[in-house]
Image: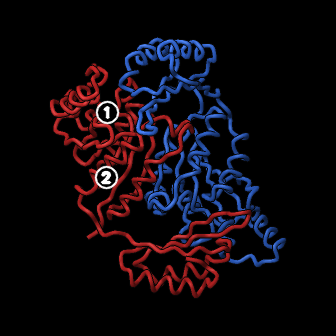
Chain colours: A blue, B red
Amino acid sequence: MPNPTAAMLVIGDEILSGRTRDANMHHLAQKLTEHGIDLCEVRVVSDDAPAIITAVRALSGQYTHVFTSGGIGPTHDDITADCIAEAFGRAIDVRDDARKLLADLCAARGVELTTERLRMARIPEGAALIDNAASVAPGFTVENVHVMAGVPRVFEAMVAWLLPRLAAGQRRLSQNLRVMQAESEISGPLRDIAAAHPDLSLGSYPFSENGQFGANIVIRGTDPAAIDAAMAQLKEAFPNGTT
Amino acid sequence: MPNPTAAMLVIGDEILSGRTRDANMHHLAQKLTEHGIDLCEVRVVSDDAPAIITAVRALSGQYTHVFTSGGIGPTHDDITADCIAEAFGRAIDVRDDARKLLADLCAARGVELTTERLRMARIPEGAALIDNAASVAPGFTVENVHVMAGVPRVFEAMVAWLLPRLAAGQRRLSQNLRVMQAESEISGPLRDIAAAHPDLSLGSYPFSENGQFGANIVIRGTDPAAIDAAMAQLKEAFPNGTT
């Protein structure tokens, strides 16, 4: 059976303006790989309702899961929850269980549950809450879209709670051979070895280091014996490679 | 006149598998902001021809420019050039000027111009070459799509050559106020200040540091005086903020 598929939608201007370097995408990609869910696409869009709604609908129809990050806080530019509601034609309002989470938190901290804080309890109709072990205000799942926070510590806490609740696929295993040769010198043998292993994926990821080009050759698959066999051939072809 | 718009398409499995953390997206976002081109969307897709072709067509129709990174090297998984040709219904073959670049490089290094190396001279019909000051093998522009390498050093060299040749927009200026308060405590005043400055964009980017939440409030716009005025109001509302 093929693995579940996924897309991620990163919402917010900070990556697009170059202010911030992405962290959540990298974290989710690693966790999904461990869980056997294939991350097939990532989109980054700004805090713009039509862009968010269009992307959510497109990705939701195409993949098993969509994971979003960003835009569910209490400020005026946090519009993700409303956009998700609109994307699926659902009503949205403050929900009692989410309100209670925030009310309890405010009581414990001795602060007032303001209208602004209550914004974080606005949940689209029929959604399931996603637990937030880092800062309480919940994420939520509507259909196959999992809506999470943008702050990395909160995003990671939500992913940690959510992933064990999603059906796992076959974990993709990988092995890596690092070769300090330009790709044009290794591409011939690499092509032959890739062709001999149609059930594996062989990728070559070039890099430059101290002005010299090299490549990481990555074998991916689900059968450890097949990966070992391909790695043996790679090592024979590129004896100076290091694992 | 509104600024030119742009999308970036990152091609390759290494970010989606979690092996690599993106660098090119962050670099391009910063350079486009400096140049006055608004980066509106980023997509990351795997080395999969239908996914690449679909994304190129969608983004090319929607934005002034599309910048791609990855998949133009000499290995079997480098399929970007062929996908771009197919996306625009153009032929693709080894081109004389690109072949000469590679032939001269091989001659200088005393290596053979193999079929594998020649793959990097395959250019879609009617494309303009993008200079590669880092490693010679060129990128290319077809219509509004600028096709560049995935290795950061090479990608950056190509961006440095390309951007001065693209029409610049108004540079977006920004100022930042860093506030060590949770967003729910600042969102009321922030909303009012944002509403008072419809020509500016005020964004709040929460973070956590040593277990405490804070936010960077970023004012963006093109009129320095308007940004100064909004910053003065922000500082009055959040006197403990730091710039």
Residue B80 occupies quadrant:
top left
In the rendered view, tell whether residue A65 sits above or below residue B50: below
Q: Closer to the camera: disc 1 or disc 2?
A: 2
At 59% from the left edge and 77% from the top edge, which residue is drawn? B242
Which of A2/B16 is in front?
Answer: B16
Residue B200 visible, this angle: yes
Task: State whether residue A73 is above or below residue B135.
Answer: below
- Residue under the image location 31 percent in, 21 percent down: B116
Q: Secondary structure at mark 1?
A: helix
Residue type, label 1: Cys
Pick whichever, B115 or A73, lies toward us. B115
> On the rendered structure, is A207 left or right of A232?
left
Query: Quick check: B89 above or below A58?
Result: above
- Per the image, the residue denoted by label 1 is B83
Q: Quadrant of the C terminus of chain B?
A: bottom right
Rendered image quadrant of residue A16: bottom left
Q: Quadrant of the N terminus of chain B?
A: bottom left
Disc 1 to disc 2, C-alpha distance: 24 Å
> Toward the viewer: A234 or A5?
A234
At horizontal 68% and vertical 39% (from top left) the residue drawn is A166
- Name the quadrant containing residue A149: bottom right
Residue depicted at 69% across the width and 65% down the height: A121
Of the image marks 1 and 2, the number of the one nearer the N terminus: 1
Mark 1 is surrounded, within 10 Å at the Cα level, by few (under 14), some (14 to 19) or many (20 or more) other residues, namely many
Q: What chain letter is assigned to the residue under label 2?
A: B
Q: Secondary structure at mark 2?
A: helix
Check disc 2 and give the amino acid type: Ala
Taking the image as shown, residue A149 lies to the left or right of residue B8, namely right
Left or right of A205? Residue B91 is: left
Q: Which residue is mark 2?
A: B160
Residue A97 on image: x %, y %: 76, 62
